[in-house]
Image (cartoon, grey):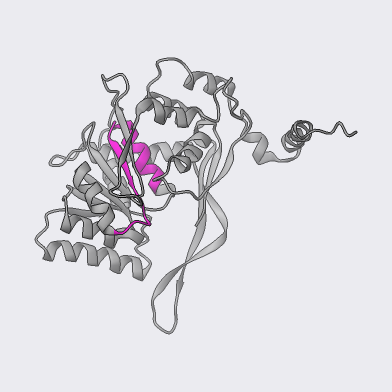
Amino acid sequence: MSTDTHEGRLVRRIADMYATDRQFAEARPSEAITAAINEPGLRLPQLVRTVMEGYADRPALAKRAVRFVNDPQTGRTSLELLPRFETVSYRQLWNRVGAVASALTNDPVHALRPGDRVCVLGFTSVDYTIVDVALVQESAVSVPLQTSAPVTQLRPIVAETEPSVIAASVDYLDDAVELVLTGHAPARVVVFDYHPEVDDQREAFDAARSRLAQAGSRVSVETLADVLDRGKALPAAPAFVSDEDDPFTLLIYTSGSTGTPKGAICPERRVAKMWRESSSPGTGSSTEPSITLSFMPMSHLMGRASLYGTLGNGGTTYFAA
């Protein structure tokens, strides 16, 4: 009878990868950082800072490289995906998170405050992650909206949560504008995953601004790139740690397939657990390198757990295009 067990084969495979795969070997989680983020009493904003600063020089996120293609017949520019990825380091991610947090919290008229809700409508991406982690640092409540849901289903969620900001990828900007015009109006709409070089995207952005202006709406529409640029010139926003022991941090809504969508409250400790899930000793979770592909929606806990567990483990998340 063979004594070659699954566990034995896995141990040998991991040892071989450490010896032959440089990317795998360099993604080994730090024992010191793992211990630090599992310290009792460490709050979520502090945990995230520990991860970002501790793994600063490692690649955190990776997105498909693109190029802009001009059609000689129409003169229009489109986006073409390339068969490679471009990475963003933990330091770069952290700097962008800080800039977004500064821009949103230092606004003289509509500053983002702890406890404010922010609805996010888009596919998992580098930009989505920047927005979401910035909300963590300022103790705002992230409300991910399902991209597959019709506006009629999203409208009661927006009405119930009354977001101060709606962040939407350019692909779902029309839906975001419809939500603004037919329900609760936030202070601003932030557009991410936007390439102004692409004619379809630029026209969608301009149309959104025009439609809101013609309707007499005072909601501002700006790109995430503009938010980043503004934030870089502002004082750094200090992370906000709530006086509450376990504050409300994330609100996940059901699909509404059995009726009106219902919100499931995720307190800070539950969200912090997602960051620790791939690094906590004694939990049965892997303490080996985490190199993952993110393709699940952020409106589902599994999509979030995969992304943030990878980051908490010092690994790299590659985003599906």
Task: Work out whether residue 17 can be spotted.
Answer: yes
The vertical placement of 239 against 66, above or below, is above
214 to the left or right of 60: left
Camera-nearest residue between 321 and 274:
274
Q: Quadrant of the N terminus?
A: top right
Camera-nearest residue between 159 and 276:
159
Residue located at (16% from left, 50% from top): 184
- Residue 237 included in the magenta stretch of the image: no
Residue 137: image quadrant is: top left
320 to the left or right of 11: left
Task: Tell which residue pokes out farthest to the left in this image.
Answer: 216
Residue 31 drawn at (x, y percent): 58, 21
Residue 212: image quadrant is: bottom left
Residue 100 drawn at (x, y percent): 31, 41
102 to the left or right of 10: left
Q: Which residues are magenta?
A: 128-150
98 to the left or right of 164: right
Residue 41 drawn at (x, y percent): 40, 15
- Residue 133 included in the magenta stretch of the image: yes
Q: How many marks?
A: 0
Residue located at (37% from left, 53% from top): 122
Task: Tell which residue pokes out farthest to the right in this image.
Answer: 1
Task: Work out whether residue 164 can be spotted.
Answer: no
